[in-house]
Image (cartoon, grey):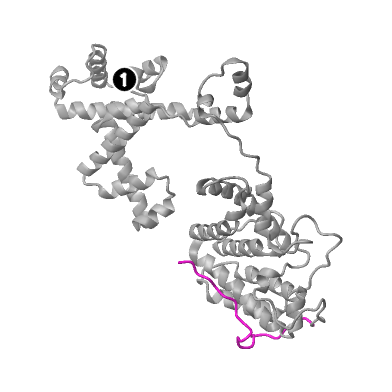
Amino acid sequence: MKLRFLPATATNPSPAWEPTTPLSAATGGAGTRGPKDPHLTVAPQGAETNGATEGEVPEPPEPPEALVKWMTAELREGLPPQATSAEAVALRFAREVDRICRMSNRIQATGDVGKWQQSLAHHRLNKCLHYFNLGSRRGRVDLHSTLSAIAYRYIAPRQAQLGFEGRTTLLEDFLQGFYIEVLKAFRRENAVPPDYTPRTRLELAEYMTFSEQYAKRRITIPGAVNQQIIVLRAQTFARRQPAETCVDMDMAMEAPKGDDGDAHGRSAALQQVREQMVTEAVDPADQVLRDRVIQELMTYLEGQEQQDCIDYFVLRLQDLPASEIDEILGLTARQRDYLQQRFKYHVEKFAQVHNWELVHQWLGIDLERNLGLSSQQWEDFLTTLSPLQQNLLQLKRDRLSSGNSTLDPGDLSELLGCTPKRVQRTWGQILSQAWKYRNQLNKT
């Protein structure tokens, strides 16, 4: 469920401070009632909206000290004791609130700037604490969803017949650029260095709060109704999209025939389609081997009664980050490290002993390819093996060259004069040494 924090209204009790900024006379026929959402409809003077401002903007006065202290106390009350940078964040919020109240004729005309300051301050602080409590990942998802919902209908040209997936792709491209614009605006409107980047969890929550407020600011365009910044940016982004082109997929897959076909085959659209088809092409045999390896590993883990390793493996196959895996499985950092070590142990045992033929075939490092080594590397590798290991390896290669890659462990034990268990252990040592040898070569 999405939380919505509403600003305080005029019926709220008196603020904890008295406004120190003198009230200016209302102009332009402003009414006595403030806007429903002044923090959304009032763009601060000097804020860049579509290019640089004209002339020099005077340095704004500092916000009332009482307002800063009150906002700092309110912010600290909602934060854990170990949270840092609360004073700096509260000061930036206070500057924004004070600037809006000074520049809004409607707020000045009400004669009660203090209540408007309290309303805007409450809204900013509640929104910041909302993002802080969500955390980095869930906070970004929430912000991304909010902005996507606003820009969704404006992101594509009107004549384009795009479905949900097409619009979502355009939204991702648009919002990446929009977040960069927001960061530049944040640096410009706050007393921070030009290379400022949010570092702490609280600073990131402040930036996400600013991003949402900046996106919802309204700009009045001459001859048109006022509109939110993110909508205007999305409409501009949509107008810059190239026109749709119809492509014959059969012709894209076939070689051009004749003069007309040759001219059509050289078109940029067809070339892009062909490049994409080649890039996304997957070898079916490789995919089948990969699926077999996954299935065999699952079966092996089930046989070893390693259900937690199976759960971890399934989440890893989905490319989830470690923090999200911890949250899903309910693991602490120490428990996750232990699980990773246990999973690694079973994977190595599976790949080097239990089903080494399948794994090495999938990786292209089977015995037919000298375990992934070149001829010279293979000769050097053989010198690192013990006599027993060399004899075992030679027996397996001889059997492979004769067309039979399998050899009964009992037969091998008789030929080598040792127990079947020792044969299996020795072969695992050979594969392990080959893996380490390849890794050393890759590092050099």
The question of residue 10 being in magenta is answered with yes
Magenta stretch, main secondary structure class: loop
Q: Position of residue 258 (x, y in %)?
A: 59, 15
Q: Position of residue 165 (x, y in %)?
A: 51, 46
User: Relative to residue 95, is residue 358 drawn left or right?
Assistant: left
The question of residue 80 being in magenta is answered with no
- Which picture quadrant has residue 32? bottom right
Residue at x 53% of width, y 26% of height: 252
Q: Secondary structure at mark 1?
A: helix
User: Relative to residue 45, is residue 299 drawn left or right?
Assistant: left
Residue 333 seen: no
- Which picture quadrant has residue 29? bottom right
- Which picture quadrant has residue 334? bottom left
Residue at the farthest right position: 55
Residue at x 29% of width, y 26% of height: 430
Name the residue carrying label 1. 367
Q: Position of residue 202 (x, y in %)?
A: 56, 65
Return the residue nearer the eye: 147 or 263: 263
Return the residue nearer the eye: 383 or 155: 155
Return the residue nearer the eye: 218 or 289: 218
Residue at x 26% of width, y 29% of height: 428
Neighbours of disc 1 within 10 Å: few (<14), some (14-19), many (20+): some
The magenta-colored residue range is: 1-22
Return the residue nearer the eye: 72 or 240: 240
Above or below: residue 416 compared with residue 213: above
